[in-house]
């Protein structure tokens, strides 16, 4: 069980919910890191009194230093500052909740200190899964999933004594705000439409990924690495209500599901308290008696091409994940900036995939190069 926790990405959706869990469970926030949100970082530092607060943005960090001059919180800046927070010796656990590829180095740094990692940053595993997991093994860092589907799979696998008994992993998918629409109907959707998720309140990037279903594609690759399963043994199931968070189907056809209210604070808490379960956390109980009907269906791979592109990349292996992810981050950035339409996200990703060559058994430099080339292909 965690006691002292560093939160990488503390000002974001997962970071803020992690702080709620830490407060409710009597844990300590040892170090906090974020990009540039000075105001929120100041509030968090005053409330949680970490030993260290890091901001990637130099000007924001200088501002924070002035704002926190009357406290004993040490403020550090730039990539070196964020990495110092990741390695902070006063923490036994790091929650990896920086969004995107930017989270890779900080996560690797925390791994190399042998910390427990509560992993929210799925892009890290999509780009560099084998490398991250090998380092975790070498340095004795335990990775506990925070992503709700992967936390569900982890819980459904806890009773499994022989991996050969697993028939497949089933990732549930809400379908996002545009479920049931045709490509024609999607051509004119706006950023505001796409940012309105039916079941979850999350950061902007993952909310767009949930609208294109790229999020589910990234999660298939994340599950493939975390649970060492080939992509053909991972299925996606549309489940609009987000009550069943994922399932494992075993060889005797038994299916084990994990259920709960759609609330990220539950998987965050389990990553922090495992192997124990504790009461008194901030998440709400699921009222099955009043939650209505649960529905299930097939994803529409023709309309939601990002999911199909991700499934293809899962099969290709090597740097295909880094190319997919880099292209998607760049394309989502362009969509959020109002430069391209919703359907063009998949077009750009597809273009990058067809242009950038895949390297098998990549090292870190191959992964960084694949990411760079994919972003360039999108631009
Ligand atoms: P947000 O956009 O809400 O937060 C991102 C956080 O990362 C912020 O604290 C931001 O700081 C920080 N950040 C961004 N770039 C850098 C950088 N270069 N260096 C240091 N800090 C940086 O994202 P979410 O919390 O929604 O998502 C975080 C991760 O968790 C993503 O990988 C996402 O896929 C994953 N995840 C999220 C879920 C959710 O429910 N939100 C569910 C499952 C997974 P600042 O605020 O200063 O910009
Ligand atoms: Mg998820």
Image (spheres, rainbow, N blue to C red):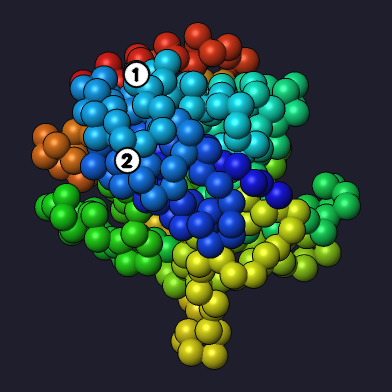
Residue 222 x, y percent position in the rendering: 56, 40
Q: Which quarter shows the C terminus?
A: top left
Q: Can you tell which quarter of the image residue 308 is in?
A: top left
In-front residue for pair 191/21: 21
Q: What residue is shown at x 24% (from left), y 29% (from top)?
A: 66
Label drawn at residue 78: 1
Q: Residues within 10 Å of mark 2 (few under 14, many from 20)?
A: many
Residue 113 x, y percent position in the rendering: 65, 24
Label 1 beta carbon less than 8 Å to ligand 1? no
Q: What residue is shown at x 69% (from left), y 42% (from top)?
A: 227
Residue 166 x, y percent position in the rendering: 78, 53
Label 2 beta carbon less than 8 Å to ligand 1? yes
Residue 347 appears anywhere in the view: no
The residue tagged with tag 1: helix, strand or loop?
helix
| Label 2 vs label 1, nearer the camera | 2
Q: What residue is shown at x 44% (from left), y 55% (from top)?
A: 17
Where 137 sits versus 296, above or below?
above
Give the distance between the C-alpha atoms of the residues marked 2 and 1, in whole angstroms. Answer: 15 Å
- Residue under label 2: 41
Label drawn at residue 354: none
Q: Is residue 321 left or right of residue 57?
A: right
């Amino acid at each position: 069980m965690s006691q002292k926790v560093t939160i990488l990405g503390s000002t974001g959706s997962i970071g803020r919910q992690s702080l709620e869990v830490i407060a409710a469970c009597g844990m300590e926030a040892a170090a906090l890191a974020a990009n540039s949100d000075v105001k929120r970082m100041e509030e968090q530092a005053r409330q949680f009194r970490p030993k260290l607060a890091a901001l990637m943005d130099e000007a924001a960090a200088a501002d924070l230093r002035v704002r926190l001059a009357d406290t004993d919180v040490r403020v550090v800046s730039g990539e070196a500052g964020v990495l110092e927070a990741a390695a902070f010796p006063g923490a036994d656990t790091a929650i990896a909740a920086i969004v995107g590829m930017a989270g890779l180095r900080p996560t690797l740094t925390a791994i190399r200190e042998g910390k427990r990692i509560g992993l929210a940053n799925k892009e890290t595993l999509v780009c560099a899964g084998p490398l991250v997991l090998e380092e975790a093994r070498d340095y004795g860092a335990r990775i506990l999933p925070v992503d709700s589907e992967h936390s569900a799979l982890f819980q459904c696998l806890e009773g499994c004594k022989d991996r050969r008994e697993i028939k497949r992993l089933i990732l549930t998918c809400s379908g996002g705000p545009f479920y049931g629409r045709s490509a024609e109907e999607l051509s004119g959707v706006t950023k505001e439409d796409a940012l309105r998720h039916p079941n979850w309140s999350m950061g902007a990037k993952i909310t767009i990924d949930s609208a294109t279903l790229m999020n589910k594609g990234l999660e298939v690759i994340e599950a493939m690495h975390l649970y060492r399963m080939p992509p053909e043994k991972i299925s996606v199931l549309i489940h609009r209500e987000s009550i069943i968070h994922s399932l494992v189907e075993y060889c005797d056809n038994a299916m084990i599901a994990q259920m709960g209210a759609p609330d990220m604070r539950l998987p965050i808490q389990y990553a922090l308290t495992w192997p124990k379960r504790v009461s008194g956390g901030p998440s709400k109980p699921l009222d099955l008696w009043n939650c209505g009907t649960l529905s299930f269906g097939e994803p529409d791979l023709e309309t939601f091409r990002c999911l199909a592109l991700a499934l293809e990349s899962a099969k290709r292996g090597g740097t295909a994940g880094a190319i997919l992810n880099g292209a998607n981050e760049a394309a989502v950035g362009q969509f959020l900036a109002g430069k391209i339409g919703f359907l063009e996200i998949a077009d750009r990703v597809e273009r990058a995939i067809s242009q950038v060559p895949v390297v098998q058994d990549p090292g870190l430099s191959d992964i960084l190069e694949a990411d760079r080339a994919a972003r360039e292909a999108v631009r």
